[in-house]
Amino acid sequence: NIWLLTGAIMVFLMVFASNVLVNSDNRETIYIFGYSEDPNQVCGYFILPLVICMERMLHKEDKRFRIIYILFLIAMIYCVFKTGSRGGLVAIMATVFLYTIISVKGMKNRIITAIVILAVLFIIIYFIIPILPETIMNRFNIERILEDRASNRFNIWLVLLTDMKTNIENFVFGKGFYATAEALSGAGISNTVAHNHIIQVLYDQGLIGCMLFIIMLATSAVRTFKRNRILTVALFGMMVLSMSITVYPYYKPFWNVLIMGALNFVEEEEKNA
């Protein structure tokens, strides 16, 4: 319920208290005390609430709440579109796809899910997209992505991966936290992070650190799969999102989902002890 409340607060802020980010193709985000949240990171706050909505929509005994969860889903997706975040939209789509694959069981639930997805798509196409600024919709055009090289991400990744190849020691052990800022500055790029957490960890902590990070994620996903697939799906969605942003510890949604998986696993061990 706390995560649903988080999602509701974010929807409220994005609908009634958001502002256009400067020089951003009319992308909207949240400003708090004069500080703005990155639009891509805003999307992460909707991933777990979205999965919870889908789960309750299918399995909640009181069917009267089904329409409320559907409307909540639509509101969150609308907010994702408002941010203009391509990585965020891909993460949401990947989350929905994985949930339908591993969590929707039985013909009845599959039919309900298909109907809901079609209804949501209809609303997005005929009601949401027409009210969005054209500059935002242009961001989702493949030609635009190739033209701006995914907001310069392709260039950032190329610089960092090329730099790692020049020194085997740095490739294995990394160059240290926040080392990307210096490398990118030297290449004439103003960004300070990799905008891809796997590449970020690989550059900062080397192959050893990157493998440990991947093992940690895989372990959490496997251990929560049988007893709490909501967390598994949400963690997958967060990982997809992290392919376009850097999730250092200050970005709480990613690490909160990961920690919740660990806490649930410890709780299960204690019950079996």
Image (cartoon, helix red, strand yellow):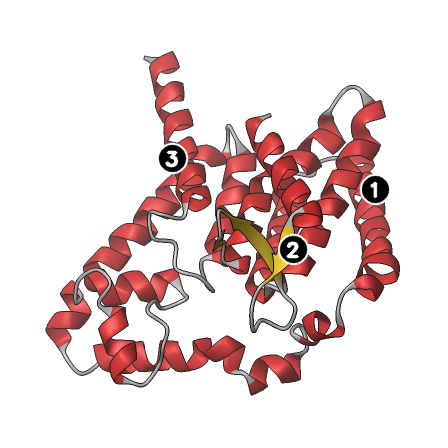
State the SS at label 1. Answer: helix
Q: Is residue 222 above or below residue 127?
A: above
Tag in front: 2 or 3: 2
Specify which label sits upstream in the sequence, 2 or 1.
Answer: 2
Task: Provide residue 127's location: percent of width, then percent of height.
Answer: 86, 57
The residue at 65%/49% (across/down) is 14
In space, the residues marked 1 and 3 are separated at their CA atoms by: 34 Å
The residue at 57%/87% (across/down) is 147
Residue nearest the observer in this picture, 103 or 252 = 252
Specify which label sits upstream in the sequence, 2 or 3.
Answer: 2
- Quarter of the N terminus within the rendering: top right
Residue 111 circle label: 1
Residue denoted by label 2: 80
Residue nearest the observer in this picture, 61 or 10 = 10
Residue nearest the observer in this picture, 257 or 42 = 42
Quarter holding residue 55: top right
Residue 162 circle label: none
Tell me whether circle 2 and circle 1 mark residues in contact (CB < 8 Å).
no
What's the residue type where badge 2 is placed?
A: Val
Q: Indicate left or right for 254 with 92 as reference.
A: left
Q: Indicate left or right for 273 with 264 as reference.
A: left
Q: Is residue 229 above or below residue 250?
A: above
For disc 2, the neighbor class at 10 Å (few under 14, some 14 to 19, many from 20) is many
What's the residue type where badge 1 is placed?
A: Ile
